[in-house]
Structure formats: structure tokens, C-alpha cells
Image: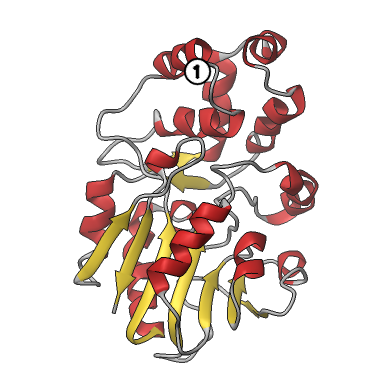
Amino acid sequence: MRQDNGGEAPAGAAWDAFQVRRHRLEPPLCPTPAVIAAMHAAIGDPAGPILLLGVTPAIIAAFDDLVVVDWSAAARDAVGEARPVDGDWLDPPLERRLFAAALGDGSLNCLAGDDHARLFATLGRLLASGGRAAIRCYVAPDLCETADQVLADVLARRSEGFAAFKWRLAMTLASEDRPDVPVAAIKQSFDALVPDRDALAAATGWPRAAIDDVDAYQASALAYSFPTRRRLLDRARRFFADAALVETDGYDLAERCPLLVLRR
């Protein structure tokens, strides 16, 4: 609830460091034009304001009449024509039934699994009758990979970027019953798996600067959540009878990045 842009924004003092790294974000950590198009298709032509969960520049540039809820003043300063609101996604200071639509990119993954129900309840309160939400989610596979399998696959194919590798590695730490993954544990798992970063860069072609971005996770007290598709839909359908996953494509790890589309 206090993250933005695909879960990559750290909280507190680490925010300034994230601002430096923001321009280096690559899919799947940021939405592609195809994802933006899928969001447009999912919510149609809303006749009213759109709620955005977290400052996501690509979404802000692509939609009008946005109200952006974000905890960070630094993020809210970059919302352009959108209306910024300082608040918590789980309890924003907004009127009931105010919004024709809601959008998010990785927003659910920034919440502990137990908070997903609270967010769905909040969306149900804020969306007008017939309102739709489209939130891109990172979902764990039904059959979890091991860290060694992820590394071997990446080295064999040499086709994915570091961001996709990092997310796959994070998902190896999740399970159906325990989808929450401490951010610091992602860094620990990476260090155990990859003792020689120069060798990884040489084998994959990844820039060393991109690989070293994982160091920002070391001191984090946050956790990300990687539910399976089944778990995500089960939670959503407790609040929205009309809930579905819409696939996205055309970028690394797209097969694990569907849009959760809800209709009130």
C-alpha cells in the first residue's frame, strides 16, 4: 500500500535512491505500451475519474482524469495533470462510489497477502456501480521452480533480462500457502546463487549496473506477495463476482503478469 510502479519503490529513506534507479526499470517492472492498451480495453471509456494505486508514469501519461494515491510526497510531485492524494491504499481519504475505474501496476504485490482482501473491499467501496478495475499482477507459477532451475534456464536461453530473472528468483521463495516474501530474502537468495556477478554479466550480457540494483533490497524491511492465479482469483471473487485474469504478452515474464480485471 505504500509502494509504486510494480513494487519497485522502497519506503522511507531509500526513496531517493529509487528515484535514481527509476529510469533503469525494464519490463516486467514497468508497463509496456501493450499493457497500457490492455488496461484501456479492460476499463473501456469510463464516465468519471479513475483511481490509480501508486505513481506509475506510463499510466499517468496514458489516462485522463486520474486521482493518484501515493504515500510519498516525492512521487506525488511527479504526477503531472493528475490529482495527487496522500494516503494509504487500504484506507484512502476518498468518497464512496467516486470512481468509474481503478488501475494499478504491481499494486497487489506490494501488499501482504492478508491485505489483499482489505484492498478489494476498499475498491468495492470506491468504485461506482458498473465500475471496473484493471491491476497488473505478478503471479507465482503453480509448480514452483528452484533457484538453481531459474539460473540454469536463464543461462541456457540467454533471453530474459535481469528484472525477469530477479522476479522469478523471488517467486521461488513463495508458496501457495505463504505467498509473502521478505524483500531482504530476495537479495540473500541471489547472493547465495550468484557468488560472481562479473561472471553472470559475461554469461548473460546483463549490465553490471542492472545486476547491482538488487543491493537496494538488502536493508529493506518490506515484503512482496506472489500469489498463484487460483489464490488471487479466490480472494478477488469474495468481493467481486465478476473477476477474471486477462493475459498480457510481448515482454519478459508476461506469462506471469496478467491483468486482474474486476467489475462492480
Image-quadrant location for residue 117: bottom left
Residue at the spot 38% in from the left edge and 61% down from the top edge:
115
Position of 57 with respect to 133 (left or right) is: right
Which residue is the site of mark 1?
Answer: 154
Q: Amino acid at mark 1?
A: Val
* Coloring basis for residues: secondary structure
Residue at the spot 51% in from the left edge and 53% down from the top edge:
34
Question: Please, is residue 121 above or below residue 95 in the view?
Answer: above
Placement of the C terminus among the 4 image quadrants: bottom left
Residue 3: x, y in percent?
A: 58, 58
Position of 240 with respect to 65 (left or right) is: left
Q: Nearer the viewer, residue 225 or 199?
A: 199
The local secondary structure at tag 1 comes to helix
Position of 264 with respect to 82 (left or right) is: left
Question: Please, is residue 130 above or below residue 238 in the view?
Answer: below
Question: Please, is residue 136 above or below residue 187 in the view?
Answer: below
Residue at the spot 56% in from the left edge and 22% down from the top edge:
190
Determine if residue 71 is in view: no
Residue 256: x, y in percent?
A: 39, 41
